[in-house]
Image (tube, rainbow, N blue to C red):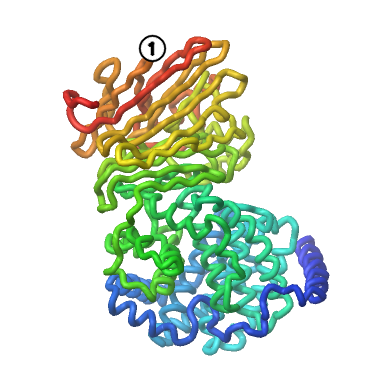
């Protein structure tokens, strides 16, 4: 009964909104009479021929096309999807639906094979018969709505009328209506990935069923145009994505889907792509992975590189094929065509659609070697070579722990030499593994349980800690200098707002730079106030570690050696700390061990030093990363 009352209440709100919206028709953003015919989303009728030509001249795309059809062949014998939640989420099912319906619709359009149409129709009717699309976790609705909308639009002429009716009813009742319920509609006010995923899915639904639900569809589109300004603001001014490259792949991919659907169906994206930093974000993503093949995986980001089909959209729009320079080897290595549990390849047809005008054999290496972005989460990334598996790579960041998906990792850095990552980040721990244990994961306040998670607090990142205390969650570290000359590449970060809680410090800065393409140097300046300050310098590495002498730690991995040479103007003691089994270790924030909910970190160790900085003293610390033997001299 409560669910029914909620639905009627939402329908009442929807009716009132539509009444107001109709009165404001003169201020609508589009001339909706000019809406394109089906298929109107992403790929217009007849553009299949452009893809066919692209497959002939681009063997990489042919590989993707073949994979998509192979997946579809396998689906023909699979049972249809059923409503099955994991914890509070239906998201895994929604993502499978998007994979299946996008792939099947694409394959039918490219081949005319009736088996793909029949299978897509069965899947459509199955998911549209679900009681709900789980609006309490509205990402589930966004992805499901996009899935059924693409299939409805692309297969429109060949679907049974009963199926079309089921889809229209489901989109209205399971997506439109709950999107007006206050308890479900928080995505409208969010600045993060939730906004483009949820609004994007709803807009796909609106554009797909527009003829039959005109006023409701216009209301959804106009509302989304206003709401989506919020996440677009987060790209300013330079394009770096606040939540890291994995979430760029998520949030930006759905933002691109949203914008391209507006353009294909209504003739333009209404100027949304002109938001400061949005188009530049493709260059951030170009730099996001190093020669090791890993991301600069700060915040809730995994380090494994994923397919970024949206990069083909940016390359086409900006007329800059260098943006897909790193995507081509990923296709050839099979990264684009690997099956994952998270269905991260569900938007794979985008590469073929957005890249249909490109010739991949003509793509050349980028010319820039540094990307610096300020804004919400400042980052600076430098690389000395674009050849696969070669050169040195440095990423350093600022930001605030309090921001979306934040960790206490301000000042952290990663470092690659060739295909080896020496300084690494643990990255995220699966949310379900923590939520299922009752961890208060999403409370970002200073003393929340989130910061007791081993992977999330500052003690276990490549950063500084004073007096064994947490970073200030509201303190923002800014990039205050960058180095882009021939001799040095890198940046300096101001850590004072992050470390200084109770007037312990006058200043704290970190400068990290690749010097003369020879070595990495990290310099920290920490100046105390009236009381002495204990300093912890920490770095995570997937290496074997050995203290050679009072100033040297030797790292070894993959038959290679990296020497860390330490010096300072105050006494310090080198340390090696374990990191593989967090539940066995004491958390220095207090007299307690890390919880058994913490994920193991096999094959890792943490190195660094402890020091005491006397009162009213500027402690200066330098660490140089030298490849090879101890006898090598450094100037």
User: 327 or 599: nearer the eye?
Assistant: 327
Q: Is 445 located above or below residue 15 in the figure?
A: above
User: 568 or 77: nearer the eye?
Assistant: 568
Residue 126 appears in view: no
How many numbered dots are placed on residues in this image?
A: 1
Residue position marked by numbered label 1 in the rendering? 571
Residue 518 percent across, percent down from the top left: 25, 36
User: 287 or 346: nearer the eye?
Assistant: 287
Residue 408 percent across, percent down from the top left: 52, 34
Q: Secondary structure under badge 1?
A: loop
Q: Is residue 283 left or right of residue 9?
A: left
Residue 521 percent across, percent down from the top left: 33, 30
Residue at the spot 43% in from the left edge and 39% down from the top edge: 482
Q: Is 17 located above or below residue 168 in the figure?
A: above
Residue 529 appears in view: yes
**Mark 1 crowdedness (10 Å alpha carbons): few <14, some 14-19, many ≥20:** few
Question: Which image quarter: residue 393?
Answer: top left
State which quarter of the image contains the N terminus: bottom right
């Amino acid at each position: 009964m409560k669910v029914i009352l909620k639905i009627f209440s939402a329908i009442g709100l929807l009716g009132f909104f539509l009444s107001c919206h109709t009165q404001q028709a003169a201020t609508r953003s589009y001339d909706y009479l000019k809406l394109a015919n089906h298929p109107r989303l992403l790929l217009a009728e007849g553009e299949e021929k452009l893809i066919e030509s692209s497959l002939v001249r681009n063997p990489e795309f042919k590989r993707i096309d073949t994979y998509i059809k192979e997946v579809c062949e396998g689906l023909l014998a699979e049972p249809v999807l059923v409503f099955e939640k994991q914890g509070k989420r239906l998201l895994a099912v929604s993502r499978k639906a998007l994979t299946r319906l996008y792939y099947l619709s694409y394959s039918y359009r490219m081949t005319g094979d009736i088996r793909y149409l029949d299978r897509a129709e069965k899947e459509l009717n199955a998911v549209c018969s679900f009681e709900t699309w789980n609006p309490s976790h509205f990402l589930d609705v966004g992805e499901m709505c996009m899935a059924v909308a693409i299939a409805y639009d692309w297969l429109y002429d060949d679907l049974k009328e009963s199926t079309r009716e089921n889809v229209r009813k489901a989109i209205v009742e399971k997506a439109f209506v709950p999107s007006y319920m206050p308890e479900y509609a928080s995505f409208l006010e969010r600045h993060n990935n939730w906004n483009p995923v949820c609004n994007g899915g709803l807009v796909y639904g609106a554009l797909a069923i527009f003829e039959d639900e005109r006023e409701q569809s216009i209301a959804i589109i106009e509302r989304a145009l206003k709401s989506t300004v919020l996440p677009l603001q987060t790209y300013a001014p330079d394009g770096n994505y606040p939540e890291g490259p994995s979430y760029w792949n998520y949030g930006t991919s759905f933002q691109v889907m949203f914008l391209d659907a507006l353009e294909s169906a209504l003739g333009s994206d209404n100027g949304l792509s002109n938001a400061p930093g949005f188009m530049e974000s493709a260059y951030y993503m170009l730099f996001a992975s190093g020669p090791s093949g890993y991301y600069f995986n700060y915040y809730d980001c995994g380090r494994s590189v994923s397919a970024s089909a949206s990069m083909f959209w940016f390359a086409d729009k900006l007329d800059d094929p260098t943006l897909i320079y790193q995507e081509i080897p990923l296709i050839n290595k099979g990264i684009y065509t690997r099956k994952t549990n998270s269905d991260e390849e569900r938007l794979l047809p985008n590469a073929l659609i957005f890249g249909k005008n490109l010739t991949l054999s003509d793509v050349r290496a980028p010319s820039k070697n540094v990307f610096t972005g300020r804004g919400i989460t400042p980052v600076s990334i430098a690389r000395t070579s674009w050849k696969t598996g070669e050169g040195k790579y440095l990423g350093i960041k600022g930001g605030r722990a309090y921001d979306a998906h934040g960790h206490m990792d301000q000042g952290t850095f990663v470092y690659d030499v060739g295909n080896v990552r020496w300084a690494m980040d643990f990255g995220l721990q699966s949310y379900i593994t923590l939520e299922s244990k009752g961890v208060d994961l999403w409370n970002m306040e200073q003393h929340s349980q989130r910061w007791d998670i081993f992977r999330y607090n500052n003690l276990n990142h490549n950063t500084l800690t004073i007096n064994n205390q947490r970073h200030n969650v509201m303190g923002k570290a800014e990039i205050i200098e960058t180095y882009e000359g021939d001799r040095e590449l890198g940046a300096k970060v101001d850590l004072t707002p992050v470390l200084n809680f109770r007037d312990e410090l006058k200043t704290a800065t970190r400068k990290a730079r690749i010097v003369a393409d020879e070595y990495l140097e990290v310099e920290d300046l920490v100046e105390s106030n009236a009381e002495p300050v204990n300093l912890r310098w920490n770095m995570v590495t997937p290496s074997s570690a050995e203290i050679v002498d009072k100033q040297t730690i030797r790292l070894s991995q993959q038959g290679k050696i990296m020497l860390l040479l330490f010096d300072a103007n105050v006494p310090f003691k080198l340390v090696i700390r374990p990191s593989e089994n967090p539940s066995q270790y004491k958390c220095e924030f207090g007299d307690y061990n890390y919880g058994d909910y913490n994920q193991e970190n096999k094959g890792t160790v943490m190195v660094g030093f402890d020091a005491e900085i006397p009162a009213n003293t500027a402690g200066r610390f330098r660490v140089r990363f030298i490849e090879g033997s101890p006898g090598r001299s450094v100037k």
